[in-house]
Amino acid sequence: MTDAAIERTEIVRRPARRVLLGSLRELALVPAIAVLIVAGIFTSPAFFTTSNLSNTAQFSAALGLVVVFRES
């Protein structure tokens, strides 16, 4: 293998590692969120209702819009 081929191989591998690490960082809070959901279901009978889920989705949508417009 030539030096150019080795350099190309290293260039291809680095972004793949960064993508993998970025994906792991994005998924790092999923277990914590799952634990909080399960705890909420067991501690409050009103937690897993349609009205609570609807209110949570509406608040999340509003917060998401604020974040998107603040970033641009």
Image: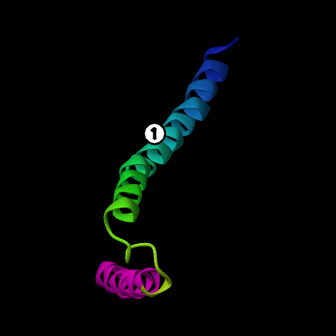
The kind of residue tagged 1 is Leu
Q: Which residues are magenta?
A: 52-72
- Tally the marks: 1
Q: Please state which of residues 26 and 6 is positioned toward the viewer in this rendering.
A: 26
Q: Position of residue 6 (x, y in %)?
A: 62, 19
Q: Is residue 10 left or right of residue 22?
A: right
The quarter holding residue 46 reads bottom left
Residue at left 36%, top 50%?
Answer: 32
Q: Is residue 26 left or right of residue 39?
A: right
Q: Is residue 15 left or right of residue 28?
A: right
Specify the farthest residue to the front. 45
The quarter holding residue 48 reads bottom left
Q: Position of residue 39 (x, y in %)?
A: 34, 57
Residue at left 70%, top 11%?
Answer: 1
Q: Please state which of residues 69 and 66 is positioned toward the viewer in this rendering.
A: 66
Q: Position of residue 27 (x, y in %)?
A: 46, 49
Magenta span contains residue 23 = no
- The vertical placement of 41 against 65, above or below, is above
Residue at left 41%, top 88%?
Answer: 58
Q: Please state which of residues 70 and 25 is positioned toward the viewer in this rendering.
A: 25
Specify the farthest residue to the top. 1
Magenta span contains residue 62 = yes
Visual colour scheme: rainbow
- The vertical placement of 57 against 16, above or below, is below
Q: Please state which of residues 43 and 16 is positioned toward the viewer in this rendering.
A: 43
Q: Is residue 39 left or right of residue 18?
A: left
**Picture quarter with the C terminus:** bottom left
What residue sits right under mark 1 in the picture? 21
Q: Position of residue 40 (x, y in %)?
A: 35, 63
Could you classify mark 1 by the number of other residues whose Cα lies within 10 Å: few (under 14), some (14-19), or many (20 or more)? Answer: few
- The vertical placement of 21 against 4, above or below, is below
Dominant SS of magenta comes to helix
